[in-house]
Image (cartoon, helix red, strand yellow):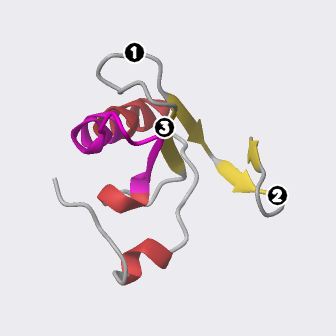
Amino acid sequence: MKIFQEPDKRLHLVSSTVKNFDEAKKITQELVEVTRGLDRPYKLWIGMAAVQIGYKKRIILYKKGILRLRLRRVRNYSIHPRVKTRGTLEQL
């Protein structure tokens, strides 16, 4: 799967809200698979947005801590995240 990186202009387009949560589940599963391939034991944080794999949807997935996504079945994700102020995240 292709991962879009800077300076790709698609990363700066405004993503749309999720209306179909079956679609959100599919996108989240793809994000999990991609981040599993990137995860390493020494990475404390890893995260990816749906737009980075080609979906213009407001979905992010992240892992915090030293446990690998493969070993830890708990994944953190947000649908419709909105940055309120620098450094904080609000879940709608």
Q: Based on the picture, tell me whether residue 22 belongs to the magenta stretch.
A: no
**Residue 46 at x, y = what percent?**
44, 45
Residue 74 lies, in percent from the top left, at 47, 18
Which mark identifies residue 20?
Answer: 3
Q: Secondary structure at mark 1?
A: loop
What separation in Å lies between label 3 and label 2 (alpha carbons)? 24 Å
Q: Tell which circle, 2 or 1, labels the residue nearer the N-terminal end.
A: 1
In the rendered image, residue 47 lying in the magenta stretch gets the answer: yes
Q: Which residues are magenta?
A: 31-50
Q: Nearer the viewer, mark 3 or mark 1?
A: 1
Q: Is residue 41 above or below residue 13?
A: above
Q: Of marks 3 and 1, which one's residue comes earlier in the chain?
A: 3
Which residue is labeled 2 in the image?
Answer: 84
Q: Nearer the viewer, residue 75 or 20?
A: 75
Residue 86, which numbered label?
none
Whichever of callouts 3 and 2 sits on the residue coming sooner in the sequence is: 3
Q: Nearer the viewer, residue 37 or 20?
A: 37
Give the amino acid at mark 1: Arg
Image quadrant containing the C terminus: top right
- Whether tag 3 and tag 2 are in contact, CB under 8 A, the answer is no
